[in-house]
Amino acid sequence: MIRIANAQGFWGDSLDAPLEQLRGGPIDYLTLDYLAEVTMSILQKQYTRDPQAGYARDFPQMIERGAKEIVQRGVKVVANAGGVNPETCGEAVAAALARAGYQGRMKIGIVTGDNILDRLDDLVAGGIELRNMDTGEPLAAVRERVRSANVYLGAFPIAEALGQGAQIVVTGRCSDVALSLGPSIYEFGWKRDDWNCLAAGVVGGHVIECGAQATGGNCQVDWETMPDLAGIGYPILEAEADGRFAITKHPGTGGRVTVACVTEQLVYEIGDPRAYITPDVVADFTTIQLKQAGPDRVQFWGIEGHPATDFYKVSISYSAGFKAAGTMTYGWPDAYKKAKIADQILRARLERLGLTFDAIHSEYVGANACHGELLSGEPSRDLAEVTLRVGVRGSDPAAIERFTREIAPLALNGPPVVTYPASGKPKVEEVVAYWPALIPKNEVTARVQVREA
């Protein structure tokens, strides 16, 4: 049995969770999931400006803070913190270990091959159209605006790095579940056609990949009685060689590990539960058996898998115009009515200026903003305050900029009892859109290198 603790669900998650996982009790592996689709475009933009950037800079800092526990307890660390620049991230990790006094004490594995940005034109010329999985459009429709393109690699390159002696493995884009599946493949010797075991590893990785969502965070069931959310524990996967596993957390930490909370995470972002497709296996979530096996412990078994597909998924981002959003807050009485009229005034002025946008959207924060007209009836006229939020999107940055200058005048020439936000004039921002596509696996080669820290 191996204990795999996850301590990051996204880039921006708790800075202290990794240290708490390292210090809270025995673990064999620490995994950290930093990457989301939009994260890749942010990192690519950083890398374009600075060839020494493009990775999650939090990760080397964490390694430095936790170096003593990692080295002395023999914990292996697996993270996709490499973003679009895994090699430089690996160098930063080595420097962090040196600063902590552990130079030469560990090996660092680097997994690359996911970044295909420089290959896009050759791929398209070779007949691989990288069609949008949602719309069917070929990538050629937005090729000139593409910012990043990364393949979701699987878990076997991670297992290969561990097999070569790496104690810290840094990857670029890989499937979220690969971070914990890789260690299981390495430790248990699972083969590429051990479909049921691989599927079990996928399900276990899916449960822990979003961090504290598996231990009571963001959990709808009994959330008001959830103990000590301020000190919530992060999840630990206890994996067995035959595919059985349990989800738990360190003793004395907040939150809960229950069937209800774990099940909420299970159905998060899965699509068809009969065919959860990953690079390594297709997992059938309808075969999952689970039960409460004690306080803060849920046991899993019986999971089945099917052969992997011949394709990798590609996460592509591209520039899709510009946007801006501004707010005005209206107070009692008739706060909602004032906000509605202010919106009408603003739209009329934009029309008189001849400004057109791809989209304009208004919300009334404090008056069912998220649901809007889906709710029957008007909000109460007794609302103490309502914030009008108006956003626009379009291809002309000059039009977006002019919109940003039309919000503030409402403070003096619109409805009464209004507050203009202290943040000031809205900012024009670039819109980065997501383009999911498929690429044949034989067009992608993962590369593994292991070096002394």
Image (cartoon, grey):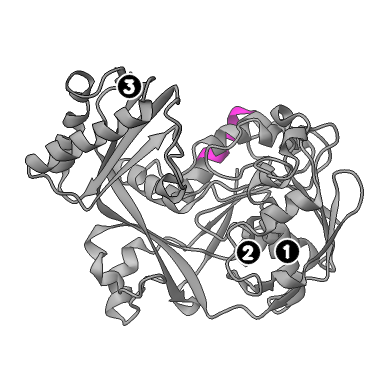
Q: What percent of the width, then of the height, locates residue 43?
A: 40, 46
Mark 3 crowdedness (10 Å alpha carbons): few <14, some 14-19, many ≥20:
some
Which of the two discs, 1 and 2, sits closer to the camera? 1
Where 53 sits versus 161, above or below? above
Mark 2 — residue? 155
Relative placement, left or right, of 42 versus 230 is: left
N-term mark: 2 or 3: 2
Mark 2 crowdedness (10 Å alpha carbons): few <14, some 14-19, many ≥20:
many
Q: Quadrant of residue 320?
A: bottom left
Relative placement, left or right, of 17 versus 176 is: right
- Looking at the image, the residue that sits furthest to the right is 294
Q: What percent of the width, then of the height, locates residue 330?
A: 34, 23
Residue at the spot x=70%, y=32% of the render? 19
Q: Quadrant of residue 66?
A: top right
Q: Are marks 1 and 2 in contact (CB under 8 Å)?
A: yes
Task: Identify the image quadrant of the C terminus.
Answer: top right
Q: CA distance from mark 2 to mark 3?
A: 47 Å
Residue at the spot x=84%, y=61% of the render? 240
Q: CA distance from mark 1 to mark 2?
A: 10 Å
Q: Are marks 1 and 3 in contact (CB under 8 Å)?
A: no
| Residue nearest the viewer, comparing 315 with 423 | 423
Judge whether residue 95 can be spotted in this image. no
Amino acid at the residue labelled 1: Gly
Mark 1 — residue? 201
Secondary structure of the residue carrying tag 3 is loop
Mark 1 crowdedness (10 Å alpha carbons): few <14, some 14-19, many ≥20:
many
Mark 3 — residue? 421
Which of the two discs, 2 and 3, sits closer to the camera? 3
Secondary structure of the residue carrying tag 2 is loop
